[in-house]
Image: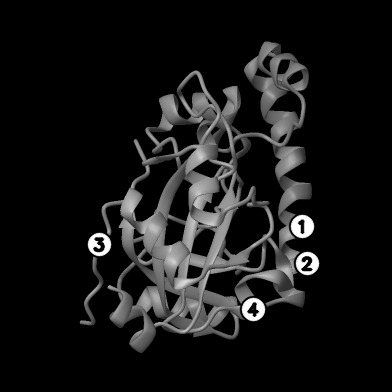
Amino acid sequence: MTDYIKKYIKTIRLNSFHPLCETDIGQNAVNKFGYPPFIDASCRREPDFENPFPSITALCRQEKFAPQLYPNDIVVYMTVKGKWLTHFDHYRIIAILEVIERKDTHLQAKSWYTNKGLTIPSKCMIHDNPPHSFNETGGRYEKQKDISNFLTYPPDKQKIIGDRIVSHWDNEYLAKSKKWSCFVISKPIFMNLTDPPILTDQDILNIFKKKINTRTPKKLTVHEFTQIAKFADVNFIRPN
């Protein structure tokens, strides 16, 4: 595995996200729509794990992540720290992706997916590709009391509030897509959206020798990557 990485891979990066199962609103989406619990929670899935070729854009992290990715790069995605359907705090390793294409615009990305007969990713900011509805997301509330209050409202009021939140949310994403327009396409080396492997704080210390801020995209050494990959039972990668 190490020889392959040194020969074929340019850069390895670690990034994190908030999964759908993080909030009660998101749990409702999992139960109602059958979504996997560990997909992204936003109205424009970022990252998007629901396509056979997962994509990454600058809708999240802006210039700090997607614009720095190129073919043959590797991206490791994990959750932020949380209890994640257990009773103790930990991280989950969700996906290991290899970048295969980089498009300059979302419109070019649409053509790439369409030409392959694939669904256009929800994050593709083009005409006639609407965002997910609010009740398909994890919500956008920061406090549990606000989530609890929202869930007490009748369905018609929830829809009015949710539509307003998504409209504002989507306008923010549209502005970001215009400023940072690159669209990165990948193939999964590993992905588990239902019961992904756990990383504890002690595992993080063993790998990195210190605590890390997963909200800031981090470059990984070959050693760090191989240690993380072992938790996902990824012990080798072979070129196609």
59 to the left or right of 51: right
The image quarter containing residue 230 is bottom left
Residue 171 image position (x, y, % from top left): 77, 57
The residue under label 3 is which amino acid type?
Answer: Asn
Q: Are marks 1 and 3 in contact (CB under 8 Å)?
A: no
Q: Label 4: how many residues lie within 10 Å, few (<14), some (14-19) or many (20+)?
A: some
The residue under label 2 is which amino acid type?
Answer: Ala
Q: Is residue 169 above or below residue 125?
A: above
How far apart in space, not on screen, are marks 4 and 1 (Cα)? 20 Å
* Along the viewing direction, whichever of 118 and 37 lies nearer the viewer: 37
Q: Label 1: how many residues lie within 10 Å, few (<14), some (14-19) or many (20+)?
A: few
Q: What scheme was used to colour the molecule?
A: one colour
Residue at the image point whose x is 55% and y is 47% from the top:
205
Residue 166 image position (x, y, % from top left): 70, 44
Q: Dot 2 corresponds to which residue? A: 175
101 to the left or right of 160: left
Q: Are marks 4 and 2 in contact (CB under 8 Å)?
A: no
* Along the viewing direction, whichever of 16 and 170 lies nearer the viewer: 16
Q: Dot 3 corresponds to which residue? A: 235
Q: Is residue 16 above or below residue 162?
A: below
Residue at the image point whose x is 69% and y is 24% from the top:
158
Tell me the SS state at disc 1: helix
How far apart in space, not on screen, are marks 2 and 1 (Cα)? 6 Å
The residue under label 4 is which amino acid type?
Answer: Pro
Q: Are marks 2 and 1 in contact (CB under 8 Å)?
A: yes
Q: Earlier in the sequence, mark 4 or mark 2?
A: 4
Q: Label 2: how many residues lie within 10 Å, few (<14), some (14-19) or many (20+)?
A: few
Q: Residue furthest top?
A: 152
Residue at the image point whose x is 72% and y is 60% from the top:
173
Tell me the SS state at disc 4: helix
Q: Are marks 3 and 4 in contact (CB under 8 Å)?
A: no
